[in-house]
Structures are given as structure tokens and as C-alpha cells.
Image (cartoon, grey):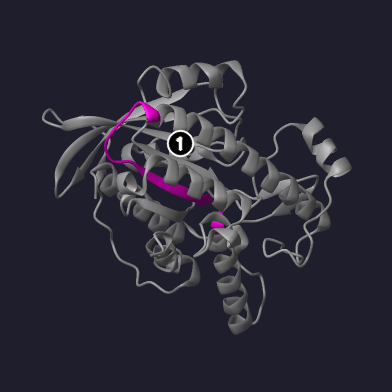
Amino acid sequence: MDYWDAVRGKWPEDCAPLLGRDAPARDRLVIKRRWNPLPRRQTGMAITGMPGTGKSFLHQALRRRLEGDDPITPRESPNYEKDRFVTATDQGKRHIELVVVPGQKFSDPAERTRERYFANGRAPTGVVHVVSWGFSKIWDENTQDVVRGISGPLDPADPRAMPQLPEVVEQARAFTFQRELDDLATTCTWLRGAWDASTGPLWLIIALTMPDLLLSRLVDGAAARRADEATFAAVAAHYLPAAHPAHDSGFAAEVRALVNYAGENRFGTRIALMPVISYRLPFTFRGVSLPPLGGDDLRARLMSRFSNRIGVYGDGG
């Protein structure tokens, strides 16, 4: 039996808003910002991912939706971020403590985060691992120079390639995909060590940020739809394990190994790949700018689905 079939089966529905296939509807909010005096036990949640994927923006977007904070501003992540909120589902209420893990895994702030939340008997119950399909922000100009010097563009035959984009963008994406895999391997090492000392249910969401950048810019509507469907099928094939391990991408193989190590029974059905738009800013690299294509309605619908899934998974559903 293919455990991952049910996980892959959620993706078409979760990315339906990007393809214009779902009917607009108001989702019931299951995350609340204020503490409740009679919650169920507290659970831990970690937002992980390589630098530039939008972890801090995702955290801010959750807070903004719940609190009405000031508009999100683009900046490099702070050294340490944590938060608390309450989920409210049909099963009751639960405190969640959230930590954003620094993308620079070998920095002093990251090591302090590891010791505080991934060691000494402490472990997150849930993980939101943020990916970007190669569109992570490269903040450092020296690193941008390195990318231009050593990274070739993705091969047009690569399912991840977007040959319609400028070559310099494809160079940045090729570099980012490799760093994304390296970061996941380090994150999985942290999680295996932490989960060794824990028991009970776990959950995992792979959050695809900036998914509207993947949408086709073709004028012909039918052709654009076919292109978008092919792109999002490639996304699932890259980030989620296949029916047979031999067909896994490097990223998917790491995900499979992590879940196998912890035990599929601890996750149950609480694994998903979900698109989410935290903010609407262009992707920029070396003078090239790609504007976002998703409007505020799309952003709100994806964020609502995403935050509600956190609530349901955090409650054990």
C-alpha cells in the first residue's frame, strides 16, 4: 500500500484556488490570537526552511491575519522569533508555541534555537517547512555574484525548469534548489534527534510560498491552464514522495526517510503540501523583477486554508 497516495491526493484540492477551480467561500477561522483560560495541553510548532523562503513573512502573515498588525515589510529575518496562539476546533482549544528557525543553520542563533527547541527532551509536535520552487530571496550581494559565477540555469528538460524566464532567474533558481535540499537534510537531522526523545502524534506541512509566481503568463487562456496544471503537477512530484521510492526526487527522498524514521503511524494523515501567499512582492534578482500574479482575494483564501490546516493538525485531526 502506498502511504503517500493520500498525501499526494490532497494537493489538487489545495492548489485549486490557484487554478480558479474552487468556489469562493468564507472558511471558518480555527486559529485565535488571544489566550483562552481553559485550553488543552500546549504543543510546539516550528517554521523551518532555507534563508529567503519567507519564514518570517509567513509568521508575520499569521499574526497580521489574527491581530491586524502593520503591513508586512521586506527585510532579513531577525535572529530569534517565537510566538504563541490558540487553535479552536470542534475538539476544543489548544495552546501552540511557535518558533521560527533561522535559515542559517550553522549560525549561533540557529544553534541556540536547536538547543532550546530540538534538544534536551524538547521537540516540536508540528513542522511547517517552507519552500519556494527556486524563488527564495538571495539577500547578500556577494552570494548573488557567486550565483552568477558558478550556477548554470536549469536544464530546459528538467521538470522544475521555467525556460520562459530570464536566464539569470533560472541560474538563481538552480542555486536555490540545491540549497533547499541541503537545508532540508540539516533540518531532518535536527528533527530525528528531537523526535527520538518524544512520543505521540506529529504533523508536517510543506508550505510552498509565492505560488503565484509559478502561474503562466500566456495570453491564451486554455494554453495557460494546461501550462499551470503541468507546473503544479511537477511541484508535487518534486516535493512529495512518489508511489515508488526509486522515483523520488532528492527532496522527496529526504521527506520519506524522515517520516519512515519517526513512524508513519505518528503522522497518520497529517502531512500536506500547501500553497500559501504571505505577502505580495515581486521576486527580484540582479535587476530582473517578476511581479506577483495573485490578488488579495487569492492571498486571503490560501492563507485561510493554511492557517485552518494548522489548527486541525495541531488538534490531532
Please provide percent x and percent y for residue 213.
61, 58
Q: Nearer the viewer, residue 204 or 167?
A: 204
Q: Is residue 293 visible?
A: no
Residue 225 in percent (x, y) is at: 57, 77
* Figure check: 13 above or below 85: below
> Left or right: where does residue 23 sit relative to residue 145?
left
Q: Is residue 204 left or right of residue 233?
A: left
* Residue at 84 percent of width and 37 percent of height: 145
User: SS class of the residue under badge 1?
Assistant: strand
Image quadrant in which you'd find residue 33: top left
Asked if the magenta segment contains residue 203, the reply would be yes
* Residue for point 82% across, 57% down: 167
The quarter holding residue 197 reads: top left
The answer to which of 298 and 171 lies nearer the viewer is 171
Query: Which residue is at 43% across, 46% downward?
Result: 260
- Amino acid carrying label 1: it is Ile
Residue 92 belongs to magenta span: no
Q: In the rendered view, would you say 132 is above or below 9?
A: above
**Residue 231 falls left or right of residue 10:** right
- Spot the residue most to the left: 38
Name the spot of residue 82 as percent of width and height, x first.
Answer: 41, 25
Q: Which residue is rendered at x = 45% and y = 36% of the image? A: 47
Quadrant where the image shows the N terminus: bottom left
Position of residue 277 relative to residue 23, above or below, is above
Q: Which residues are magenta?
A: 196-211
Which residue is at the far right?
149
Q: Nearer the viewer, residue 1 or 201?
A: 1
Res 184 visible: yes
Rendering coords of residue 217 (x, y %): 66, 70
Q: Residues within 10 Å of mark 1 (few under 14, many from 20)?
A: many
Q: What residue does disc 1 label? A: 47
